[in-house]
Image (cartoon, rainbow, N blue to C red):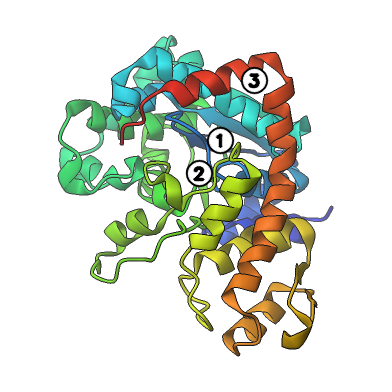
């Protein structure tokens, strides 16, 4: 695959790329650059972290990159997830890996790494201190969005440490590309600024779209950072998220209740599911309708769906039924894995028993 084709694939993943020119230069120099993404293990994993992640990782590895999936267990500990119980967090980390393995991710060029694998290294903590020595408290507090928190909620010293660790992770993992969500942008930009100063490199930042939760968006939030936190899918709002091991009935129920106003395309979570998951995985969507409303309709692209829906030619409930069917098709292999694999089944039972804390 030539450089332009590889570049185009990775640009499909990035809602923002900092910078495109640097990404192109990187692909010209390296056949197999390293990209990474990280997640806090803090409970059940939803489709944004499972299916959407698999879609994006597959594009990046198809472009020739080696991908490191990072279970950030110590970061979740610093962020007081699961009541600050590290053992429970690490169980969640093992569960996270089992989900990714079953979610359709091409594993040939994917390496699973846990923060607990690197924190025992003295050189890692040297990197953390280098980041902290070259940053102000105010600058680190401004990165609080990466923890799903507003600046005013960054109160504990461990949360300051979190951002320093995440910036250091990039260099410890030898990542050329930070391929994380838009909500992680601020710490990746910090790493770009500090990298050359600390004797490292300036990583390329490819920030993917954050899938919306299923609830109706609030209209009273105008701050861009706070709005990004509010809109994204969250496990702390379980009825507005589809989890990777939800039953077929749960998926149908949650989708049927989802915010999906007629003719409205923007900030419509069901349309987002279509754009970022359904058409990416299936390339088309069949919308089943009664004959009196025109009969079933085969939609061949998201652009076509957007036009038909905005014109009122597809009813929200018909769209929801089609999306629920496709989601269940994608989730069935994951459900089977956790039902038939003894290790995975035990991990899921443990995670379900944990009380989720924000």
Q: Identify the residue at image location x=47%, y=58%.
A: 214
Q: Identify the residue at image location x=53%, y=42%.
A: 46
| Mark 1–mark 2 CB contact (< 8 Å) | yes
Figure quadrant of residue 219: bottom left
Q: Position of residue 236 (x, y in %)?
A: 37, 42
Task: Residue 208: tell me if it is visible.
Answer: no
Q: Residues within 10 Å of mark 1 (few under 14, many from 20)?
A: many
Q: Position of residue 125 (x, y in %)?
A: 36, 17
Q: Is residue 20 above or below residue 203?
A: below
Q: Is residue 292 above or below residue 6?
A: below
> What number is the disc on residue 175?
1
Ranked by sequence position, the earlier of labels 2 and 3 is 2
Q: Which mark's residue is nearer the viewer, 3 or 1?
A: 3
Q: Which residue position is annotated with label 3?
A: 344
Q: Residues within 10 Å of mark 3 (few under 14, many from 20)?
A: some
Q: Gap between marks 3 and 1, in whole Å?
A: 29 Å
Task: Residue 286: tell me if it is visible.
Answer: yes
Q: Residues within 10 Å of mark 2 (few under 14, many from 20)?
A: many
Residue toward you, 301 or 311: 311
Q: Is residue 37 above or below residue 323?
A: above
Q: Gap between marks 1 and 2, in whole Å?
A: 7 Å
Ranked by sequence position, the earlier of labels 3 and 1 is 1
Figure quadrant of residue 105: top right
> What number is the disc on residue 203?
2
Tell whether 155 sits left or right of 98.
left
Q: Position of residue 117 (x, y in %)?
A: 51, 14
């Amino acid at each position: 695959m030539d450089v332009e084709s590889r570049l185009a694939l990775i640009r499909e993943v990035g809602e923002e790329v900092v910078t495109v020119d640097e990404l192109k230069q990187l692909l010209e120099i390296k056949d197999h650059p390293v990209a990474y993404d990280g997640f806090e293990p803090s409970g059940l994993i939803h489709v944004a972290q499972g299916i959407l992640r698999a879609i994006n990782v597959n594009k990046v590895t198809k472009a020739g990159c080696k991908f490191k999936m990072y279970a950030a267990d110590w970061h979740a500990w610093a962020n007081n997830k699961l009541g600050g119980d590290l053992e429970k967090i690490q169980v969640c980390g093992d569960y996270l890996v089992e989900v990714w393995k079953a979610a359709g991710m091409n594993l040939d060029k994917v390496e699973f790494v846990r923060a607990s694998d690197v924190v025992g290294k003295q050189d890692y903590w040297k990197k953390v201190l280098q980041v902290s020595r070259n940053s102000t408290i105010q600058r680190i507090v401004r990165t609080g969005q990466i923890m799903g928190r507003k600046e005013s909620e960054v109160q504990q010293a461990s949360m300051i440490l979190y951002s320093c660790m995440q910036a250091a992770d990039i260099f410890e993992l030898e990542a050329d590309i930070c391929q994380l969500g838009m909500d992680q942008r601020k710490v990746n930009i910090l790493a770009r600024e500090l990298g050359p100063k600390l004797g490292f490199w300036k990583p390329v930042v490819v920030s993917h779209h954050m899938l919306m939760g299923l609830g109706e968006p609030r209209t009273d939030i105008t701050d861009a950072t706070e709005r990004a936190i509010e809109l994204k899918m969250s496990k702390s709002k379980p009825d507005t998220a589809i989890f990777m091991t939800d039953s077929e009935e749960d998926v149908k129920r949650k989708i049927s209740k989802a915010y999906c106003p007629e003719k409205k395309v923007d900030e419509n979570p069901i349309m987002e599911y279509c754009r970022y998951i359904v058409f990416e995985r299936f390339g088309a969507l069949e919308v089943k309708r009664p004959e009196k409303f025109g009969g079933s309709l085969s939609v061949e692209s998201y652009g076509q769906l957007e036009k038909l829906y905005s014109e009122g030619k597809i009813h929200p409930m018909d769209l929801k039924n089609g999306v629920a069917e496709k989601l269940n098709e994608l989730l069935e292999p994951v459900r089977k894995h956790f039902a038939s694999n003894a290790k995975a089944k035990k991990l899921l039972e443990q995670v379900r028993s944990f009380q989720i804390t924000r």
